[in-house]
Image (cartoon, rainbow, N blue to C red):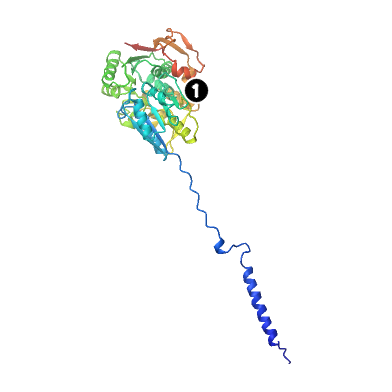
Amino acid sequence: MRRYRFPKLMYLVLVLLLLVAVGLAACAQQPATEAPAQEQPAEKPAEEKPMEEEITLAIEHFSIIEGTTWSGAHDRAGKRIAEKYPNVSYIYREEVGPDSTVPFAEELIAEGADIVIGNAEFMGLPLKDIADKYPQVIFGSVIASDLTTKPNFVRFFPRQYQALYLEGLVAAALTESGNIGVVSAFPSVQVIRRQAGFTLGVLDGAELLNKDVTIYVKYVGDWYNPTEEREIAKTLIDQYKVDVLTQQSDSGSPLDVATESGIWYVGKDMDIVGEYGWSSTDTVAISFDTRWEVIYDRMVQSKLEGNPPETVMYPGMESTFTLADGTVETTVDIMNDGKVGVEAISPKALPKIPQEIVDLVKQRREQMMKGEWDPFTAHAFISNGTGLELEGQPVPEKGAEVKPAGETPTVEWLLAQFNFDLEGVTILE
């Protein structure tokens, strides 16, 4: 068979063509848009997230913290806010009087304070005098009766009377003598308003149980005077035969006397058994706990968001704060030995309390948490004829109906003008 042979030249041409084709194929595998290595842009560094604004909450406490329920609750609130928010810190001063409010405030601002609180009105009001000087700082003060505000000077108070009403129901059920005693600070709108909540609870409980109950109130003349508070507590027990004792003053002396005398005690401001280990549920029938952090959190949020704060805050059981551990707490609540609600009633006291009272405590608490019921709206306000005369506002005559049942009093009236005791209270000289 004859074989066909390519000429040498033709062979060389074919080889060259093959090499060119292979080269073109290799190039085709490269992405058409790929830039040469030296022209590739440098990798962009990841953008850093802006850090959250650092906030410092400063509280000026009018009293010492240790061994008090009022300043103790404020101090706990500051700590709880700092525990929840990594970018919020808490600093404070103790035993601050009106003359030292501003110097201490300026010290705290120099330390970085963005929010400065006076935890009582008599020593918190001077903060308004420097509010214009430090427009970037939020100042705040508890309300006793003055409602002065500025865009950065906030006034506040929790609706403690709601929890006090629930305590009154329990107190009415527990008294056997029909005599309940209150060791109180001094006549003021704040004190009168809180006592009114307790009084309405006692009266409702007594009516439900068909009991005759008298509430005796004797004033100390100061918020914190352990010696005088002890003497008044003993007087109420020895002379007026009270077998349930509570207080609107700040030392632990009335509780000590109740423990020594073997009578029931109703606490205020904090869960004194669970928080401090004071006495036990053998003496403490119930307490109410105040969570000032609900209010302070609103100021912190205003600061973080760059919004002006609310200038008057008066939250109740419908408002909440979530702790760092996820616990949701209302502004005020009945509490005892770490328990809340009807479970907070002392195990020793519970068998002495009729079921209808326990059911009513549960019902009213749930209604207030939903914002569906309030003792100050539901009840008429009948004057006892005693109280505190304000400028241009005398104490209403005994028996006068100042507010009818079913009418909601304004926030301003409750905070600044509620100047009379409710009928059913006996004020002792």
Q: Quick one: 211 or 34, which is closer to the camera?
A: 34
Q: Is residue 34 left or right of residue 393?
A: right
Q: Is residue 173 left or right of residue 301?
A: left
In this rendering, is residue 49 above or below 266?
below
Residue 157 quadrant: top left
Let me know if residue 337 appears in the view.
no
In this rendering, is residue 39 above or below 220?
below
Q: Position of residue 342 (x, y in %)?
A: 41, 28
Q: Position of residue 46 (x, y in %)?
A: 50, 51
Q: How many marks?
A: 1
Residue 347 quadrant: top left
Q: Quick one: 207 or 96, which is closer to the camera?
A: 96
Check the image and name the residue furthest to the bottom.
1
Let me know if residue 13 appears in the view.
yes
Q: Quick one: 330 or 393, which is closer to the camera?
A: 393
Q: Quick one: 123 or 181, which is closer to the camera?
A: 123
Q: Quadrant of the image for the C terminus?
A: top left
Check the image and name the residue furthest to the right.
2
Q: Position of residue 350 (x, y in %)?
A: 37, 26
Instruction: Identify the residue shown where x is 31% and y is 31%.
Output: 276
Instruction: Identify the residue shown where x is 50% and y is 22%.
Output: 373
In this rendering, is residue 294 above or below 9?
above
Q: Amino acid at mark 1?
A: Trp
- Residue position marked by numbered label 1 in the rendering: 373
Residue 66 quadrant: top left
Q: Position of residue 161 (x, y in %)?
A: 42, 21
SS at circle 1: loop
In this rendering, is residue 3 above or below 35?
below
Neighbours of disc 1 within 10 Å: few (<14), some (14-19), many (20+): some
Q: Is residue 375 left or right of residue 19?
A: left
Instruction: Identify the residue shown where x is 62% and y is 64%.
Output: 31
Q: Quadrant of the image for the N terminus?
A: bottom right
